[in-house]
């Protein structure tokens, strides 16, 4: 295979359900694990050279992959560099939030406790401006190193350049993947610098436990899922007050609704869980039902937080 000469280590027909938290998805035609920044850049150059569609994959935590799979190159981000200088943490896009939180705690640094239990990578978290408990990535980002695909060069964006908003950023509004890029997206996240605050380690651990206990109590963590399916919408008539998407779905009587092997969780209606070998189409049907019911009952249009591939 010509691609194997250009990109040693690339694999064929790898099932993507093994690389998403939903445990759903068909095979990728080509699959490459990028363990360094240079690997990421090389894989993208090869994909462009071969005119091959590509998708940059993090931990697959906010993603629904089609049952038929993906007819291009999956570039799985696995650059795990992690360094600390005073209150700043420099971290490769492939490092999980859990690993960053553990490192921060060890070094008495506070500000990311809210991310406990979010299974994504730091790159994915920046891409979608992940958040919880009224906090988000934009509160702690100082800069993001990215590859500009069009120019084939790396650039560093400051916080303000990232155009963070509710569950979005300059990276996601370009239409790329949850880890920072597919073919439509010109910017691929390579590494991130965050700044935290010194704090008492016991206080940090207590805060982490509080957030973790809340998730265990209120979210269906015993089944594969992609986390919250929908963004919390604003009320109609232009008011900026956000309402719970889960509550709207629950009020439509959809808790426990099953199609195939997928189910709208009884514990939290903004979670769709894979309880019995669900297919992507099972999930999509439930998504469409929830959107239609909420629109008809409340005149509110739900927008997905998860990405489709």
Image: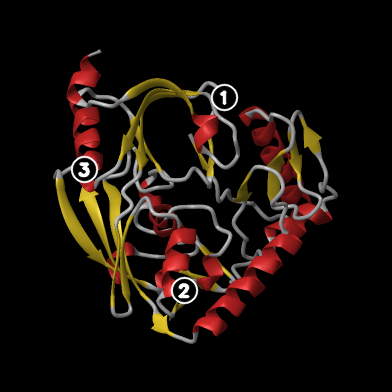
* Sequence order check, earlier mark of 2 and 1: 1
- Seen at 68% across and 63% down, the residue is 215
Residue 134 location, x and y as percent? 57, 74
Q: Which mark is residue 149?
A: 3
- The quarter of the picture where the N terminus appears is top left
Cβ atoms at labels 3 and 1 below 8 Å apart: no
In this view of the protein, which residue sits in the foreground, 84 or 172?
84
Residue 36 location, x and y as percent? 25, 45
Residue 150: quarter of image: top left
User: Can you identify the residue that label 2 sits on?
Assistant: 105
Residue 96 location, x and y as percent? 44, 55
User: Can you identify the residue that label 1 sits on?
Assistant: 67
Q: Is 224 on the left or on the right of 115, as rendered? A: right
CA–CA distance between discs 3 and 1? 29 Å
Q: Is residue 182 above or below residue 138?
A: above
Q: Is 129 on the left or on the right of 189, as rendered? A: right
For discs 2 and 3, the disc positioned in front in the rendered view: 2
**Can the viewer see residue 242?**
no
Q: Residues within 10 Å of mark 1 (few under 14, many from 20)?
A: some
Q: Secondary structure at mark 1?
A: loop
């Amino acid at each position: 295979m010509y691609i194997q000469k250009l990109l040693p280590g690339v694999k064929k027909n790898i099932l993507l359900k093994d690389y998403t938290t939903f445990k759903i998805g068909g095979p990728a035609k080509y699959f490459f694990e990028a363990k360094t920044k240079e690997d990421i850049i090389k894989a993208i150059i090869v994909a462009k050279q071969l005119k091959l569609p590509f998708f940059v994959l993090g931990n697959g935590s906010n993603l629904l992959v089609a049952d038929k799979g993906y007819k291009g190159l999956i570039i799985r981000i696995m650059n795990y560099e992690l360094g600390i200088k005073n209150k700043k943490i420099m971290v490769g896009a492939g490092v999980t939030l859990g690993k960053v939180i553990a490192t921060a705690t060890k070094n008495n640094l506070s500000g990311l406790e809210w991310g406990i239990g979010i299974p994504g990578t730091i790159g994915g978290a920046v891409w979608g401006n992940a958040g919880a408990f009224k906090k988000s990535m934009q509160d702690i980002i100082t800069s993001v190193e990215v590859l500009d695909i069009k120019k084939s060069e790396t650039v560093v964006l400051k916080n303000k350049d990232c155009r963070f908003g509710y569950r979005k950023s300059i990276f996601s509004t370009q239409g790329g993947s949850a880890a920072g890029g597919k073919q439509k997206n010109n910017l691929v996240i390579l590494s991130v610098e965050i700044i935290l605050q010194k704090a008492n380690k016991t206080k940090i651990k207590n805060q982490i436990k509080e957030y973790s206990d809340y998730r265990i109590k209120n979210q269906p963590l015993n089944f594969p899922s992609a986390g919250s399916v929908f963004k919390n919408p604003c009320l109609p008539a232009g008011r900026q007050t956000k309402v719970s998407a889960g509550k709207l779905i629950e009020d439509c009587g959809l808790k426990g609704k099953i199609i195939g092997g997928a189910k709208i969780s009884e514990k939290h209606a903004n979670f769709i869980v894979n309880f019995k070998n669900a297919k992507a189409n099972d999930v999509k049907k439930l998504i469409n039902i929830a959107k239609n019911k909420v629109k008809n009952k409340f005149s509110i249009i739900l927008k997905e937080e998860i990405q489709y591939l």
